[in-house]
Image (cartoon, grey):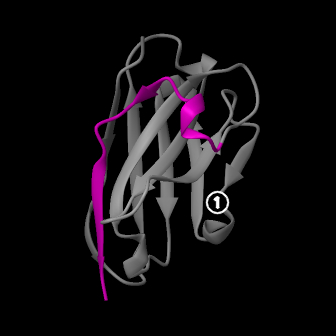
Amino acid sequence: QVQLVESGGGLVQAGDSLRLSCAASGRTFSRYGMGWFRQGPGKEREFVAAISSSGASTTYADALKGRFTISRDNANNTAYLQMNSLLPEDTAVYYCAARQSWAGTSSSDRQYDYWGQGTQVTVSS
């Protein structure tokens, strides 16, 4: 079992940057592929980015490529989402998720086994 705790959200202005962290419990973090999803007000949850268990592979939502970067530190059981040039439409609750997988990435939330509680990101114009 993996427990995930997100942090790093907050209120920022358009154009600012934020880095979200996802701290995972347990000793097997390196066996899990990680993903970030978000849910804006009145919207469905959507895929943001994913990274393979080793960190060798990453996948991004097309609209976010170039502004968001996913990474992980397996030694410290933490995944990150660096968000640059934030826009008001990036306002959402951001969730990290983990899936048991030795390789590859997934953009489908159905593939993920564990979820964090979410962290709010609000971008003002």
Residue at 65% of width from left, 40% of height from top?
A: 51
Quick check: 34 left or right of 117?
Answer: right
Q: Which residues are magenta?
A: 107-125
Is residue 34 positioned above or below 94 on the image? above
Indicate the quadrant containing the N terminus: top left, top right, bottom left or bottom right: top left
Quick check: 103 left or right of 121?
Answer: right
Residue at 43% of width from left, 57% of height from top?
A: 44
Residue 112 appears in view: yes
Q: Amino acid at mark 1?
A: Ala
Choose top left, top right, bottom left or bottom right for residue 89. Answer: bottom left
Residue furthest to the bottom in view is 125
Residue at numbered disc 1:
61
The question of residue 30 being in magenta is answered with no
Residue 66 appears in view: no
Q: Position of residue 9 (x, y in %)?
A: 29, 57
Quick check: 84 left or right of 116?
Answer: right
| Mark 1 secondary-structure assignment | loop
Q: Nearer the viewer, residue 20 or 90?
A: 90
Q: Position of residue 84 (x, y in %)?
A: 50, 71
Residue furthest to the left in view is 11
Q: Nearer the viewer, residue 113 or 23?
A: 113
Indicate the quadrant containing the C terminus: top left, top right, bottom left or bottom right: bottom left
The question of residue 121 being in magenta is answered with yes
Residue at 56% of width from left, 33% of height from top?
A: 110
Q: Position of residue 117 (x, y in %)?
A: 28, 37
